[in-house]
Amino acid sequence: MEKRVSNNFRFISSLSMIGIVFLHSKFIRSRWNETLIENDPISWISIFFQLLISEQITRLCVPLFFVISGYFFFKNYDGSIQAYYIKLKSRFKTILIPYLFWCLFWFAIYNLFSQFQHLDSFPLALIDALVNPIPFQLWFLKDLMALVFFSPLVYFLITKIKQHYLFIALLMVYLLDFSIRSHIDSIVFFLLGASLFLSGNKWFLKQNIKIYLCAYTILSLIFAFLNLYSLYVNHTFIVLIHKISVIIGILTILYSVFNFDMNHLSFKLLLNKLSAGYLFFLFASHEPLLSFLKSGFVMYFKSSFNLLGYFLLPLITIFITYIIYFVLRKKLSCILFLINGNRQ
């Protein structure tokens, strides 16, 4: 069963990596600021789909990454100093080195295009680029490295607190934070993943997935519709609906991971072509490439709605990054292996 669960988690992780690109493909609530045109039905459709997909469905991807990271981190970890050292050494290669490279790479590119106009404040700008990287998706690696560093404390909490008390505490902390994404989310879902592995996953063996799936679908649609009329609905209530749906969505996926064999899924044939190395490369490099493509799309089409670009540009981004990855693998495989965190 453990091998099947591990394979299922890897499948879900691959799917989530693609979802991250669509999460960032939205034109609403961004610097492109696509807004609703009341008498234009296409505008309503465009906004609705972006809300449903980028603000709701794909928002499951990042919590899932933390759950999966916590789950796999505590395999072969017994809380000893030696085990902690081994884990730190491993994550130094797989997380810290790629984080530093991609931060510095995009910092250099940004300054090259600006013709190094800010050399007088270069040290402070460099530090800021390492703390707040230009490719904003790298916050995930930064949070993950911090959680790895404090993993002995995580292990202590999970082994000393009764499981149901821990779940209730995590649930309350998550729900009482009225922001769509914060560092609290990272801690909550990493702890959840760690506790899943250490508790033996028994809780997920006797649940009804149909109830979870139905509840998640209804809440997702409610969230999207409420956001269309957000001027008339309390923002805190919308966030609460979203967070409840995320919890239910995560539970639905975890139930599937622990109870089904996903090898029969035909979509996995496609994902098998996308190696772990490429998927990490896609994660690290899709921004700011995707933002560049979105700016070009808006400039060229000058449309009040961008539904075509919303669906098309992520696919173009995936294609471009795959070509770059393929060339690097052929010509500079050693460097690619290093900046990709030893992933092939």
Image (tube, rainbow, N blue to C red):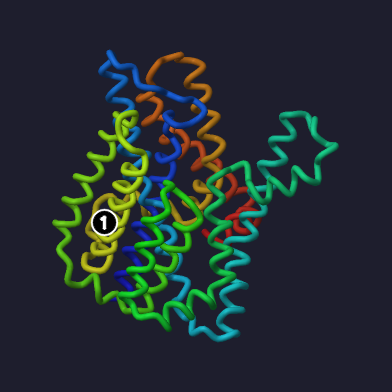
The relative height of residue 76 versus residue 44 in the rendered view (above or below) is below
In depth, the one of 266 and 66 nearer the eye is 66
In depth, the one of 301 and 120 nearer the eye is 120
Q: Is residue 218 left or right of residue 5?
A: left
Q: Position of residue 85 (x, y in %)?
A: 61, 79
Q: Is residue 270 left or right of residue 94?
A: left
Query: Number of marks in the image?
Result: 1
The relative height of residue 43 versus residue 153 in the rendered view (above or below) is above
- Which type of secondary structure does the marked residue at label 1 adopt? helix
Q: Amino acid at mark 1?
A: Ile
Q: Position of residue 27 (x, y in %)?
A: 43, 29
Residue at 71% across, 29% down: 113
Residue at 62% across, 66% down: 92
The relative height of residue 93 versus residue 279 in the rendered view (above or below) is below
Mark 1: few/some/many CA within 10 Å (<14, 14-19, 20+): many
Q: Quadrant of the N terminus?
A: bottom left
Q: Position of residue 99 (x, y in %)?
A: 62, 54
Q: Position of residue 39 (x, y in %)?
A: 27, 13
Residue at 81% across, 39% down: 121
In depth, the one of 85 and 243 nearer the eye is 243
The relative height of residue 128 versus residue 91 in the rendered view (above or below) is above
User: Label 1: which residue?
Assistant: 248
Residue at 43% across, 45% down: 20
